[in-house]
Image (cartoon, helix red, strand yellow):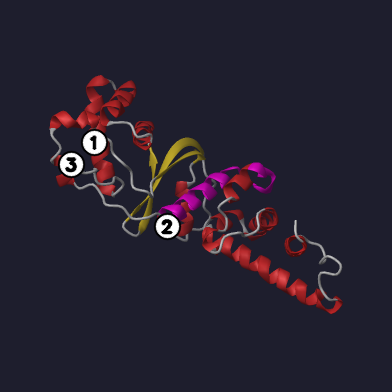
Amino acid sequence: MTQLQTLQGQFQGALLQDQPAVAGLLAANREAQFGVYRNAYRARLRAALRDNFEVLPLVMGDEAFDALAHAYIAAHPSRHYSLRWFGHQLCAFMADNDALLEHPAMLDLARMEWALRQAFDAPPAALLTPAELAAVPPQDWAELQFTLHPSVQLLDLRWAVGPVWHAMKSGQADVPPPEALDHALLVWRQGMSTQWKSLTPTEAVFVQCLIAGQRFGAVCQALAQRVGEDAAAPTAVNLLCQLLGTGAICSLPSH
């Protein structure tokens, strides 16, 4: 490690930890000014976390969220050129430090919020149209391989945080705590708006198959285990049409 790298590490340690600057790193009369800068730097990072996780601080409360933010900033200083991505490790940090959470559902809420942010920033893609799908010959359906839009994400959640997120975004007061509920949450972007939907177990199996790249025939076989062989293909077509209407499926590759 070079001397410059050592000094940079010492400066960052003093900036992020509640300790004075390393002796000799700053002139004696600059310690107070450094403290002002350190506080402003931390405040900027806390503000970035509040921007990137809008609902989480509303549910946790300012004191609890600031304590979480302080611990996260110390453990994971910003290393990206844009603060828009600051917080990409917050969910993993929360999972490893659950003592900072007054309610375990806060982790699922953070995961949902980060997924929505990722969906908004996902690249565009050409979408499958009803006319394009109708033009596929019946004998080719079993081999069709559908690709989901880059914004699509499927989260396995343990708490029903969707209604809480919606209530807080709507400005409702006295929102009850989320109920325990194992379910899958689908997140995607339609146009310029992010969307989410809690899925039934059958819907979740269907989306999981598409994410795994399974062909339509294999998707129907997977659904048959839940709805029976006779209902598998109609169910798959119905679910496909639903996704088609949400703009979550990309155009088929040309042959």
Tell me which segment is drawn in magenta.
96-119
- At label 1, the amino acid type is Asn
Q: Which percent across, then down, holds residue 153?
A: 42, 44
Residue, disc 2:
121
Please tell me whether mark 3 or mark 1 is closer to you in this view. 3
Magenta region includes residue 107: yes
In this picture, is 236 found above or below 161?
above
Q: Does the CB distance between marks 1 and 2 fall below 8 Å?
A: no
First reached walking from the N terminus: tag 3 or tag 2: 2
Q: Is residue 127 left or right of residue 54?
A: left
Q: Residue at x 57, y 55 (%)?
A: 87
Report the disc number at residue 128. none
Query: Could you classify mark 2 by the number of other residues whose Cα lies within 10 Å: few (under 14), some (14-19), or many (20 or more)?
Result: some
Magenta region includes residue 224: no
Query: Could you classify mark 3 by the number of other residues whose Cα lies within 10 Å: few (under 14), some (14-19), or many (20 or more)?
Result: some
Residue, disc 3:
133
Choose between 180 and 70: the one closer to the eye: 70
Please tell me whether mark 1 or mark 2 is closer to you in this view. 2
- At label 3, the amino acid type is Leu
In this picture, is 117 found above or below 227?
below
Q: Residue at x 54, y 46 (%)?
A: 177
Q: Does the CB distance between marks 3 and 2 fall below 8 Å?
A: no
Q: Quadrant of residue 39?
A: bottom right
Q: Is residue 166 visible?
A: no
Residue, disc 1:
238
- At label 2, the amino acid type is Asp
